[in-house]
Every structure is written in C-alpha cells, then in structure tokens.
Amino acid sequence: MGLVGSLVKKGVELNQKLSFSTKQPQETQEDQLRELLDKAKNTAFGKYYGFSEILHSTDVLNAFKAEVPIHDYKSMHERWWKKQQEHPDITWPGKPDFFALSSGTTGKSSKRIPITQDFIHSMREVGTSLIRSLPNFEFPEELFESEILMLSSTANLSKHAQGHLEGEISGINVSNFPGWYDLFYRPGKIIAAIDNWDQRVQRIVEEAPNWNIGAIAGIPSWVLLMLQEIVKKHKLAHIHELWPNFSVYASGGVAFDTYAEDFKAICGKEITIMDTYLASEGFFACTTRPDTMSMELALSHGYFYEFIPFDERGVDDQGGLLADPESHTLDEVVPGQEYVLVISSCAGAWRYVIGDTIKFTSTNPHEIKITGRTKFFLNVVGSQLSEEKMDEAILHISEQNNVTINEYMVAAVKNDSGEYIHQWIIVSDVEVDREKISATLDETLKKANKNYKVARSKSLKGLQLEVVSKEIYHSYLEKSNKKGGQVKTPKVMSESKMNQFLDFLRSKV
C-alpha cells in the first residue's frame, strides 16, 4: 500500500468534506441563469434579446423563456455562431479560441460548437467534482497512485482560416491539459496527437507495459477494441495481468449495457463502471456514487437546464419539437418521464436543444440517464420506438440466445412491394441463428411497446435482419470516415444510409 496513494486518497476525502452548499438545487440553477445573463448582456445576442431588461424583471426565469426562443444547431449556427468565428462578443464575451467538431452521429456534416475559456474551465470543474466523489466508492489506495488512460480523439487540432483551432471536444480538452497532468495522464500528448486512429492505438498497445493504469475513460466500443488489442499483442489471459490496479472505467457517449459482458470477459477482476455525460456542448453529469450507472447533474458549473417533455406536450409524432413546447425547470421534473434536454451555457449556447433525451432516476439528488437521441426515434409508421426500448430488446435477445451484440443499426425501409419494414443490422462475431434472432426481436418489441405491436398489425409489414462481423463493421466505419476514439455511430439510420450500408455488405460477399 503506497504512501503516496494513502496521502492522495486522504486529500480527496478532506476536499470532499470541505465542499458543500446550503442552496437548494433550483436556487442554484436560477443563480446560474443570472450569472450567464449578466456575463453575456453586452454581447450581440444579449443586446438583441434584452438580457439587461430580463435581469431587472421581477421574474427572471419566465422573462428569459418569454424573450429568448428555443434554438437548434441550425438557427444558432447560421445566425450567431458562424459570425462568432470572425468577430468577438457575439453570443459570449470575446472570441473563442476553439470550435468543437461534433462526431457526427446525426446530420450530414460535423457541427461547429464554440469552446470558450470559461467553458474549458467549466468542464475541468465537473471533472474535479467526479474526483471529489471517489471517496464514496471503496477504491483501493493503489488506485490513487496509478495513471489514467483517456482514449480521446486526436489532440492534433487543425487551424481554421479565421484563426481558431478545431477538433473534437475530447481532443480540445487533451490539448488544454496543464503540464502537471503529464504526471498521470496516458497515453500522453504525443501519442494523443497522432491523427490516424489505427496508428494511435498501435502506439498505445506498444507502450501499455510501461504504464500503471488504474482508470480508463472513453467510448466503450473503442476502449474495448483497444483492450482486446493489448491482450492479444502481449498474450495475456486478461488485462489485469498487465494492469493489476485497473479498478475504474468511466464510460460515456453511448449506453454501456450492450458492452458489459465483453468487458467482464477481458477483465480478471470486477471493476467499477461509472457513466459520464460529456458532449461537445458540455460536461453535464457523471456517476457520483456506487451501485448505479445514473449520473448526477452538474448544477453549478456554468449550465442552466430546461426540460421539454418527450410526449405530446413537447414533440410531434416524429420526435420533432412543437412550435411552442412546454418547458420545465429542475423543480418541476419527475422521475421516469422522458425529456428533451435544453441548455444555456458559458459557451454561448442559449436555450439550445442538444438532441438528447434523458430521464430522471432520482430528484434527490438529481440523477439522470440518457435514453437516446430525438433523431434516433423510429416512428415512420407509428412504431414509436425509442433508443432505450431498442437497447433493452437487444439485451434481451442477447441473454436469451447466449450471444454478444454490442452494436446494431435499424431503419424503416420499403421492400420490393413498396411496403415499410424495419431493416436491422446487428454486429456479432458469434454465429447466430438469424431467423430465430429476428423472430425473438420482433416479439420482444411487440411486448415492450404497444405502438410497435399495432404498427406491425397494420403498416409495418415485417422485420428483416442481417448479421455482420466486427471486422466488416469497422471496415464500413473506416470507409464512412467514422472510425476513432470518440466516434459514436447512429443506431437509427435513414433509409438511404441503410441502403448504402446494405450495398457495402453485398460488395463484401
């Protein structure tokens, strides 16, 4: 048991005891809104929407809702953020040094999200809150003198013609790490700056024996692939033969459940899985206590949240926002209800719809789970399938048929008769009975969702299933420029995208 580990652990515990607030969550959130409005009141956005007047109103919250419309990326980018690439003081004081390129799970091209210095500081503060929560877990002291491996996108950022740097948010974060992070951060900035994903992983595999990894962070699909490469290269029975102190995995980006069995198979002992909600638009939540994958919402870190009910009060039949949706604040949310998340932030996002749906698992503390994407809502013929329901169905058929399925894709497509079916593609290296899996999936969805059952008896004429290996799947991602440490691939595809994937599969036969 190392002296350093003992001292660090005691220091974190003391910091946790000294960090407290007497304010109620809603009061904290209203303070955040006032701080954001005050800081941005002299920007072009703040002047246009009268932030100074809002701040002097008797009801700041309702005045804010009344004066500032809800924005999606297109409206924020075209009218405001595009100008912020050239001019200062557009939606936030100053001119951003960075713009984050989204990983492109939806839409035809990457989005550009402004990243301000206040925003970078905010993300670090949420990360610090996660560290403060570690004493809630029974981690060995060796963990506190181990290293952290963060599998990010490349930290080699590109220079834009307007002078700012661009890259994915994880790469921007890594490039802004202070020098003392080098003491514990792996793979280090040199390896993290390698552009090519395969080359970066190869260097990590080569260097792995030189590191003492206690914690890993990254998207599960790519972390799993990296760990499998390390085990294979160094002829290990499991990863703990190389990294005995590996105790924590911080997941994020996609639901972890479909990867759980593969992570167990590659480990020699049980590890703690923590979830994180880190997007290009912010670091919004993380797991702060044991025995749950729910994440506590970051309430005092430069974000103000609103929650639009993901039902007839807020969205149409296709999951699109109504013209005037209901918008709830933190004191109005209820556990189990699905919401579209809306944020205002210190990056200059105002009443901005990220595109994620969440639900609260607790309101004391305020803990959430991500349930999907608004654009991953499959409802072409009234089936009303959410990503959460599809994940649950995939887990069920995996358990029933003793197979491992990490990834899947689905789309509503027309068959040769011009009738709609659901086309599924599942990714598995295990030989499966395709007809049996297909029938089980169909029946599972019928039992889980009455709307799907009704659709199957009317306009939705069937379910077709293709099974592809991980090798073929990764080949498709590479061809589609979607291969890398922070890339999240869509689970619900458009008909055209699905047909492109099917054409690719046929070319491999």
Image (cartoon, helix red, strand yellow):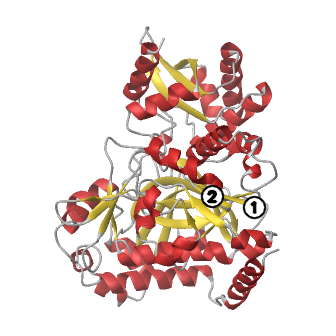
**Residue type marked 1:** Asn
* SS type, badge 1: loop
- Residue 396: quadrant of the picture: top right
How packed mark 1 is, by other alpha carbons closer than 10 Å (few <14, some 14-19, many 20 or more), is: many
Closer to the observer: label 1 or label 2?
A: 2
- Residue 384: quadrant of the picture: top right
Figure check: 191 above or below 117:
above
Residue 210, disc = 2
How packed mark 2 is, by other alpha carbons closer than 10 Å (few <14, some 14-19, many 20 or more), is: few
Which label's residue is closer to the chain start, 1 or 2?
Answer: 2
Residue that badge 1 annotates: 245
Q: Tell me the quadrant of the picture where the N terminus can be found.
A: bottom right
Cα–Cα gap, marks 1 and 2: 14 Å
Residue 160, disc = none
**Residue type marked 2:** Asn
Which residue corresponds to the image point at 62% horizontal and 47% vertical from the top-left?
255
* SS type, badge 2: helix
